[in-house]
Image (cartoon, rainbow, N blue to C red):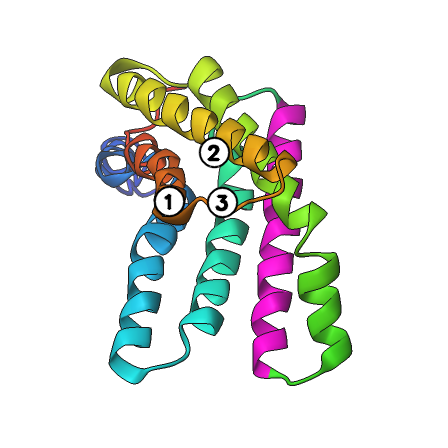
Amino acid sequence: MATNQPSNTGPKTTTVSQGISGVRIRSPLGLLAALTFLLGIPISFGCQILFGSGAGTMIHFVLAAGSLLLAFAVFDFKLPRWMNWIGCAAGVALGSIFLLQAVALLIPNESLNYFAYQVLGQWPEGWLPDVIILWFVALLVFDSQGKSRILGIVAMSIAVCFDLYSHVLRFGGTSDTGSLKLLMLLPLVWLLFESTKKPDPE
């Protein structure tokens, strides 16, 4: 005998999907990466002030975590695939360098310290951030709209000018830019806003 059973499809599915989309953000990984950089760096210096040591190790772990999160956050944005893969590779490489440098501070090994700081800490660590900055510029050009685009133009203009300035100093025999290095946090502030946007409807 056939019996009538209530259907479980239709309105319930629609209600759930609307509820989920209401709390979604564009890039959870991008948000985590930005927060890791922006909050982790002052926390590292706070540890140094409170405990008298540990800032170097902590800040390298923070930079490693932020770089690796950013490496995989790039795929949440609508850039050409090859650009995202380049950004991902640069983030993974930079994060790996910072992680190795943090380990070198924890483990007293002369060979490890030399490789982490004198080999990887020179040319690779000096140029990989430039690749990431170029990815940010591509994000501004290809996938930023509205008010956050204005913030992006300001942040990236300052960051690119500072990056060029630091390279000029490096070619001149010095690379100490002091507190001006904090200007490189501006793209991360912009990333915070870009990541928390609601995703565009497909």
Q: Reading the chain from its start, which is encountered first: label 2 or label 1?
A: 1
Q: Is residue 22 left or right of residue 40?
A: left
Q: Is residue 11 left or right of residue 101?
A: left
- Residue 7, position as x, y percentages in the image: 29, 38
Q: Is residue 171 left or right of residue 76?
A: right
Q: Nearer the viewer, residue 157 or 144?
A: 157
Residue 197 drawn above or below residue 71: above
Nearer mark to the viewer, of 2 and 3:
3
Question: What residue type is disc 1 on?
Answer: Pro
Q: Which mark is residue 143?
A: none
Residue at disc 1, secondary structure: helix
Residue at x 40% of width, y 48% of height: 178
Q: Which mark is residue 70?
A: 3
Residue with the mark numbered 2: 76
Residue at x 29% of width, y 56% of height: 39
- Does the magenta run of residues contain 52? no
- Residue 64, position as x, y percentages in the image: 53, 59
Question: What residue type is disc 2 on?
Answer: Asp
Within 10 Å of the Cα at label 3, are there few (<14), some (14-19), or many (20+) other Cα atoms? many
Q: How far apart are labels 2 and 1 at the CA level?
A: 9 Å
Range of residues picked out in magenta: 81-106
Residue at x 36% of width, y 38% of height: 183
